[in-house]
Image (cartoon, rainbow, N blue to C red):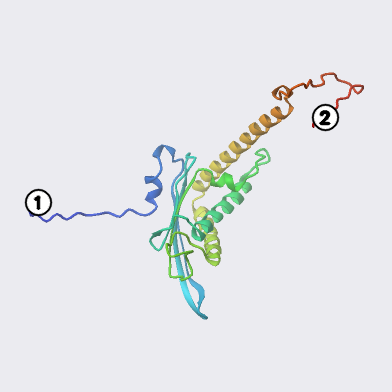
């Protein structure tokens, strides 16, 4: 500093999953944060006609919020992949498939719910961080997007296994998230009913159509007919 004193500042790097809570209003958080890791060092990649062993290590964290635009982000080898890509899509598909199946299996006959992926994704905050030595990884030199179909499938399958193993040991947390998905499904169903009701009313309410020189037929009975000609 100006006095000639040596000042040492210590920086504490927080775990990447803390970004979920840092980027989310604490009043919007409605579930615990779940953190998982998957690892595979048996991946074969062929480059220039030569095959070599590669590895992937992926950390993921997710939680549910009341936010209409929950925080979703992804990283790959330290790069913020702002356009996301295969690593995020693989994790997201696995989460959707797992909770769609698990929630359906928990339903009773009285629930009468159809669980869709949108019910799982609604309010889901998610962050993933991939580390790998795969060479065919990004769509361009900017490294904004990961694109590798084989990698996406591996991540999806490994994530499904990781979710199953985690929630077998943490069934209370699983039930908590299942109830959130059920609530999302009920909200979607009621929203669709309200929308269909409004559409049906507007289609059958002739008073809302004001046409020049048109008087709708109001007589009832088989002996009355109405012919409407439009030029």
Which comes before the other along the chain, label 1 or label 2? 1
The image quadrant where one finds the C terminus is top right
User: Which residue is at a point 67% across and 38% down the rendered structure image?
Assistant: 110
Q: Position of residue 73 (x, y in %)?
A: 44, 52
Q: Nearer the viewer, residue 142 or 115?
A: 142
Query: At numbered mark 1, what does the secondary structure look like: helix, strand or loop?
Result: loop
User: Which residue is at a point 55% across and 65% down the rendered structure image?
Assistant: 149
Label 2: few (<14), some (14–19) or many (≥20) C-alpha neighbours in 10 Å: few
Above or below, 213 against 121 in this view is above
In the picture of the structure, the residue carrying the numbered disc 2 is 229
User: Which residue is at a point 48% across and 70% down the rendered structure image?
Assistant: 136
Circle 1 or circle 2, nearest the eye = 2
In this view, the residue farthest toward the top is 219
Between the C-alphas of marks 1 and 2, the distance is 90 Å
In this view, the residue farthest toward the front is 231
In the picture of the structure, the residue carrying the numbered disc 1 is 2
Q: Nearer the viewer, residue 62 or 199?
A: 199
Q: Position of residue 129 (x, y in %)?
A: 42, 58
């Amino acid at each position: 500093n100006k006095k000639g004193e040596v000042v040492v500042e210590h920086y504490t790097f927080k775990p990447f999953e803390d970004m979920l809570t840092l980027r989310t209003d604490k009043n919007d958080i409605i579930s615990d944060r779940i953190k998982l890791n998957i690892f595979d060092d048996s991946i074969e990649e062929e480059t220039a006609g030569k095959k070599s062993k590669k590895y992937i290590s992926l950390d993921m964290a997710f939680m549910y919020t009341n936010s209409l635009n929950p925080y979703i982000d992804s990283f790959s080898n330290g790069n913020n992949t702002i356009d996301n890509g295969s690593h995020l899509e693989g994790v997201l598909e696995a989460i959707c498939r797992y909770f769609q199946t698990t929630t359906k299996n928990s339903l009773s006959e009285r629930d009468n719910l159809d669980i869709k992926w949108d019910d799982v994704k609604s309010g889901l905050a998610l962050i993933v961080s991939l580390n790998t030595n795969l060479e065919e990884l990004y769509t361009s030199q900017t490294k904004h997007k990961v694109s590798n179909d084989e990698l996406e499938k591996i991540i999806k399958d490994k994530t499904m296994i990781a979710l199953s193993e985690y929630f077998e040991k943490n069934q209370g947390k699983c039930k908590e998230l299942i109830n959130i998905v059920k609530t999302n499904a009920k909200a979607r169903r009621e929203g669709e009913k309200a929308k269909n009701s409004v559409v049906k009313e507007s289609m059958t309410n002739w008073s809302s159509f004001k046409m020049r020189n048109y008087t709708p037929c109001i007589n009832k009975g088989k002996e009355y007919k109405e012919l409407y000609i439009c030029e």
